[in-house]
Image (cartoon, rainbow, N blue to C red):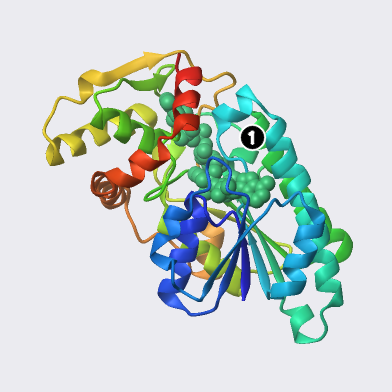
Amino acid sequence: MILVTGGAGFIGANFILEWFSRNNEPVVNFDKLTYAGNLQNLASLQSDVRHVFVQGDICDSQKLKQLLDDYQPRAIIHFAAESHVDRSIHGPDDFIQTNIVGTFRLLEAARHYWNKRIGKEHYDFRFLHVSTDEVYGSLPPDVPAFTEEHVYSPNSPYSASKASSDHLVRAYHHTYGFPTLTTNCSNNYGPFQFPEKLIPLMIVNALTGKPLPIYGDGQQIRDWLYVKDHCIAISRVLEAGVPGKTYNVGGWNEKPNIEIVSLICDLLNEFCPGDYHQLITYVTDRPGHDRRYAIDARKIERELAWKPLETFETGIRKTVQWYLEHKDWIANVQSGEYRKWIAMHYQ
Ligand code: NAD
Ligand code: DAU
């Protein structure tokens, strides 16, 4: 079996669902269930024996050791993280704990476990670290997209914590020969994304007639990738990636935020007619806001024959439809904690 950390979150849950759509290898899903973890994302697997859920924290070395001894996975796919930039600005502590200390504890537990494996089980073992394009910092306009050789220049507590974890992963390969793989992906969107992130926040606010808060001038550029394409890329890297290497993953899909929000308003108007554009509200910019990210995804295409299947136009349409069809899911995640965050951050 494989071990997935953070499998109750947005990308982790999509990864597990995508994994089972193609093969029957069991998954043990280790997740702390923070505000961002939601087992409802995996409700369709409730009586599926291929999925085993274990609640726990990647900072807990004892629990990690027990987990590895009990389930003996052939690979670890490490998604667990604090992932929201705005939260890292309000309170970096959890980001340092989970993203840096947690990744370190997981690497240590996994290294000791790997050292005890023999023969094929030792040689074929893989540790895949899921990271972000934000580690490369902000790209000026008209400069080529980030390649795997781009210098690290993280600008937020979130991206600095992810960059630290990437460096630890790199060092474990270099020092111990530990068989790591790292993916650095651009902005994901799709089903089950928590409505604190741009796209789901805009959809859920628009549906309830609330303001659509655009930071600064709305001209910041992100490179959007449909989450299922990211999940397929991760499986491909696990299957054929070379230990020690890193792979950039992106959608060749650079768009300014205001264009994204405008498109969401148009799509909502098509499905549930209304003037959503008038809800657009320019608000104070995010401190240290990175202006542009763009991924050069030629290496993963050339070496592993991966490229995105979804265009932004098809992916965003599916995403808006998914949220329209899952109003119960939206209502359930808008708990007291969610309302407190929205009130505090957008006050
Ligand atoms: P998410 O916030 O939706 O989910 C994170 C999951 O990790 C949650 O289920 C949470 O309960 C779990 N978790 C948090 N702390 C934990 C801990 N200490 N121990 C165990 N579990 C813990 O995040 P996401 O958007 O699904 O991102 C997953 C990974 O992908 C992250 O590492 C993130 O940095 C990376 N990434 C995200 C994007 C994106 O656009 N969302 C893009 C590139 C890379
Ligand atoms: O690039 C990959 C990263 O993408 C991941 O590593 C992160 O985990 C993920 O959260 C995401 O980070 P961003 O900061 O780019 O995503 P977010 O959805 O928070 O914001 C996208 C853009 O929209 C960004 O320029 C800020 C802007 N924005 C966001 C929110 C929440 C707004 O203008 N208004 C908002 O209310």
Residue 76 picture location, percent across and down: 67, 65
Q: Position of 327 compared to 160: left or right?
A: left
Residue 119 picture location, percent across and down: 80, 86
Front in this rendered view, residue 8 or 216? 8
Front in this rendered view, residue 53 or 27? 53
Q: Is mark 1 within 8 Å of ligand 2?
A: yes
**Outermost right residue:** 175
Disc 1 element = helix
The residue positioned 83% from the left and 83% from the top of the image is 118
Quarter of the image with the N terminus is bottom right
Q: Position of 99 compared to 115: left or right?
A: left
Determine if residue 220 is in view: no
Residue type (three-letter) at the residue carrying disc 1: Tyr
Quarter of the image where one finds residue 69: bottom right
- Tag 1 residue: 158
Determine if residue 39 is in view: yes
Q: Position of 170 compared to 251: left or right?
A: right
Quarter of the image where one finds residue 170: bottom right
Within 10 Å of disc 1 (Cα), the crowding (few <14, some 14-19, many 20+) is many
The residue positioned 74% from the left and 63% from the top of the image is 244
The residue positioned 38% from the left and 21% from the top of the image is 214
Residue 318 picture location, percent across and down: 27, 51
